[in-house]
C-alpha cells in the first residue's frame, strides 16, 4: 500500500514537472514569435533568459494598460503630408530633416497613445506591437544622436530617414492591416 502511494506521489510530481516545462517552453516560443529579434536582444541585455523573458512579459502588461488607439483618417492624412514635407526637405538639409523625422515619429506615437518618456521606454513600448521595425527605430535614433555630437555622413542620414520611415509607416497603419507585426 505504501509503495502504491509513493508511486502515485512520484507520478504526480513527474506530471507536474512535465506540465511546468511544457508551459514554460510554450511561453518562450510565444515570446520569441511576438518579439522576434527583440527577444534575443532583451535576453542578451538582461543577462539571463529568465530575466529577459520576465522583462518582455512586463512590457506586454504595461502596453495592455495603455489606451492605444488607431489614428483617424484625417490624422493619418495630416501626418502623411508632414512626412512628405520632411522627406522633401532632406535634400537641402539632411540633418534638420532627421530631427524633424524623429519629432514626427514621436508626435505619431503620442497621437496613438504611447507615452513619451525616454527613448528606451518608448522602444520597449513599441516592441510589443511593432517588434519588426524596432531595430529600425533604434538604428535611426543612434544615427540622430551621433549626428548631434559629430555631423554624420549624408549616407548615414539617408539610412536614418529610411529607418524612421519604416516605423512611421507601421504607426500609421491600423493594427488589423499590419501584415508583419504582432496584433493584440
Image (tube, grey):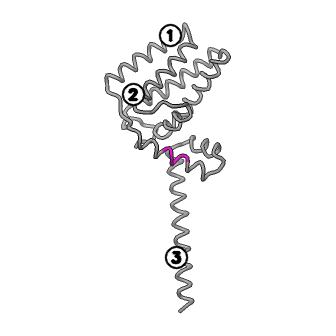
State the SS at label 1: loop
Nearest to the observer: residue 79 or residue 87: 79
Residue range of the region highlighted in magenta in the rendering: 55-59
- Mark 2 and mark 1 lie on one chain; the one further toward the N terminus is 1
Q: Is residue 15 above or below residue 91?
A: below
Residue 104 in picture, x, y percent from top left: 46, 21
Residue 32, given in percent of the width and then of the height, sits at: 54, 47
Query: Rounded to the nearest whole Å, what is the CA distance between mark 2 and mark 1?
Result: 24 Å
Badge 1 or badge 3: first in the primary sequence = 3
Give the residue displayed 60% in from the left and 53% down from the top. Answer: 50
> Which numbered circle lies on residue 111?
2
Q: Nearer the viewer, mark 2 or mark 1?
A: 2
* Tag shown at residue 12: 3
The reply to whether discs 2 and 1 touch (Cβ–Cβ < 8 Å) is no
Magenta region includes residue 104 = no
Viewer-proximal residue among 30 and 126: 126
Q: Judging from the image, what secondary structure is the residue with disc 2 in?
A: helix
* The label number, if any, that marks residue 89 in the structure image: 1
Count of numbered badges drawn on the protein? 3
| Kind of element beneath mark 3 | helix
| Magenta segment, prevailing SS (helix, strand or loop) | helix
Of all residues shown, which one is farthest toward the right?
150
Task: Tell me if residue 44 comes above or below residue 7 in the rendering.
Answer: above
58 in magenta:
yes
- Disc 3 crowd rating (10 Å Cα; few below 14, some 14-19, many 20+) is few
Circles 2 and 3: CB atoms closer than 8 Å: no
- Residue 179's image quarter? top left
Residue that sits furthest to the front in the current view: 117
> What's the distance in space between the residues labelled 2 and 3, CA to CA?
52 Å
Amino acid at each position: 500500500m505504501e509503495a502504491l502511494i509513493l508511486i502515485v506521489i512520484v507520478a504526480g510530481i513527474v506530471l507536474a514537472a512535465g506540465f511546468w516545462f511544457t508551459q514554460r517552453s510554450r511561453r518562450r516560443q510565444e515570446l520569441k514569435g511576438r518579439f522576434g529579434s527583440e527577444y534575443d536582444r532583451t535576453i542578451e541585455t538582461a543577462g539571463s533568459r529568465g530575466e529577459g523573458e520576465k522583462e518582455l512579459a512586463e512590457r506586454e502588461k504595461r502596453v495592455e494598460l495603455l489606451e492605444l488607439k488607431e489614428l483617424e483618417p484625417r490624422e493619418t492624412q495630416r501626418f502623411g503630408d508632414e512626412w512628405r514635407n520632411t522627406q522633401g526637405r532632406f535634400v537641402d538639409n539632411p540633418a534638420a530633416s532627421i530631427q524633424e523625422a524623429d519629432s514626427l515619429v514621436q508626435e505619431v506615437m503620442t497621437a496613438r497613445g504611447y507615452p513619451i518618456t525616454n527613448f528606451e521606454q518608448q522602444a520597449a513600448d513599441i516592441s510589443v506591437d511593432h517588434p519588426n521595425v524596432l531595430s529600425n527605430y533604434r538604428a535611426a535614433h543612434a544615427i540622430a544622436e551621433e549626428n548631434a555630437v559629430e555631423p554624420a555622413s549624408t549616407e548615414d542620414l539617408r539610412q536614418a530617414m529610411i529607418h524612421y520611415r519604416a516605423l512611421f509607416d507601421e504607426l500609421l497603419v491600423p493594427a488589423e492591416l499590419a501584415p508583419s507585426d504582432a496584433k493584440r
